[in-house]
């Protein structure tokens, strides 16, 4: 919604840069959307930079949230948002049409959202190009924190935990040898490693770019994140995703990966990962996230064997399957059925809300 409103503002001549939209989004997360007046004030405080932009902002806000006609900007075509902010069914549409007429007489505004067509819940494979661009901007704003684990290093502490003799003596020397203050330390912590294995085969084509952007947001947010792509071969792309600019990062990934939209050999590529990286140390104690629909051209016995090897060293295996959101879905594909016994968490990955849920799972894992 915020991304769509930003396009409306630009169409009406208000310079809404990505930083301002990100600030607006964070502000809405804090204050909520319970009041139209509150949303208006928060939007104006974050998005209007100059006094002369105020009338344009008011018209854009009215056109977006109130569906009021605007005659002054007919030469500019504001972006269509009917797919994200409308009623669910024709019956609801007729009912709400009557409500709108009474609302206009009372000068009252009703803001409605469809539970089935909100952009964040929409399947990536069913989105238009404009909607995908809006979703990509929201994915770029995501930041994965992830869970932490105890480290061997001990750090200073204000609480009376472990007595730190060395720092206590150092403090005493500053006070002519009198140990007036006691120093303590505690067990430190560090981020638990997260390893992404991303399926970029033809069957995953509608979801691959969105999932790559999610992996990029994770790489730039924290350390100890590794990303691999696989189709018919395994490719490590962590270095390419270290660019802050997501578009440049994906250009570098596309230049390095040669098996986009091809076939899938899950068992063979997972065996390559286990032999070269995983079992030797990268996957030990890590949360391994496999993003795939489970379609595999190889033998399911090979995949089952390699999943078992990986499960012995990884802390958790999280499988993200965009097809899981489909009504009546069952993991009947040979690859998915072979991998299922070794999966700790099985989640969806078809929409922005599903990726947000994945981020919460990683925070708790």
Image: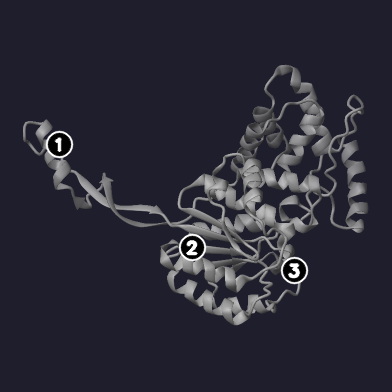
Checking the image for residue 171, the label placed there is: 1
Residue at mark 3 to residue at mark 2: CA–CA distance:
26 Å
Q: Quadrant of the N terminus?
A: top right
Q: N-terminal of the two: label 1 or label 2?
A: 1
Question: SS at mark 3?
Answer: loop
- Residue at 27 percent across and 46 percent down: it is 157
Residue 267, located in which quarter of the rendered image? bottom right
How many numbered marks are there?
A: 3
Q: Which mark is residue 326?
A: 3
Residue count near mark 1 (Cα–Cα under 10 Å), binned few <14, some 14–19, many ≥20? some
Residue 352: x and y in percent read: 67, 53
Q: Quadrant of residue 80?
A: top right
Q: Residue furthest top?
A: 52
* Residue name at image x 76 percent, y 71 percent: 327
Q: Is residue 166 above or below residue 71?
A: below
Q: CA distance from mark 1 to mark 3?
A: 64 Å
Residue identifier under label 2: 287
Answer whether labels 1 and 2 touch (C-beta < 8 Å).
no
């Amino acid at each position: 919604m915020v991304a769509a409103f930003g396009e409306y503002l630009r169409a009406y001549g208000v310079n809404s840069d990505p930083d301002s939209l990100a600030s607006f989004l964070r502000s809405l997360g804090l204050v909520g959307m319970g009041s139209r007046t509150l949303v208006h004030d928060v939007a104006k405080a974050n998005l209007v930079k100059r006094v002369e932009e105020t009338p344009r902002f008011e018209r854009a806000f009215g056109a977006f949230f109130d569906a009021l006609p605007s005659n002054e900007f007919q030469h500019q075509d504001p972006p269509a948002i009917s797919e994200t902010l409308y009623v669910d069914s024709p019956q609801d549409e007729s009912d709400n049409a009557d409500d709108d007429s009474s609302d206009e007489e009372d000068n009252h505004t009703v803001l409605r959202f469809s539970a089935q067509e909100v952009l964040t819940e929409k399947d990536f494979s069913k989105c238009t190009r404009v909607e995908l661009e809006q979703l990509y901007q929201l994915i770029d704003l995501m930041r994965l924190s992830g869970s932490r684990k105890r480290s061997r290093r001990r750090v200073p502490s204000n609480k009376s935990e472990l007595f730190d003799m060395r720092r206590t003596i150092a403090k005493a020397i500053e006070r002519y040898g009198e140990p007036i203050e006691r120093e303590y330390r505690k067990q430190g912590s560090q981020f638990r490693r997260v390893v992404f294995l991303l399926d970029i085969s033809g069957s995953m084509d509608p979801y691959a770019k969105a999932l790559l952007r999610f992996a990029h947001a994770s790489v730039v947010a924290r350390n100890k994140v590794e990303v691999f792509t696989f189709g018919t071969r395994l490719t490590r792309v962590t270095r390419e995703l270290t660019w802050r600019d997501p578009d440049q990062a994906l250009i570098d990934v596309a230049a390095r990966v040669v098996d986009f939209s091809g076939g899938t050999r899950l068992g063979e590529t997972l065996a390559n990962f286990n032999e070269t990286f995983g079992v030797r140390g990268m996957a030990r104690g890590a949360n391994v996230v496999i993003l795939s629909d489970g379609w595999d051209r190889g033998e399911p016995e090979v995949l089952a064997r390699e999943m078992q090897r990986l499960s012995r060293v990884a802390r958790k295996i999280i499988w993200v399957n965009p097809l899981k959101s489909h009504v009546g879905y069952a993991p009947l594909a040979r690859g998915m059925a072979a991998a299922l016994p070794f999966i700790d968490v099985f989640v969806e990955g078809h929409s922005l809300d599903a990726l947000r849920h994945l981020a919460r799972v990683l925070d708790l894992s």
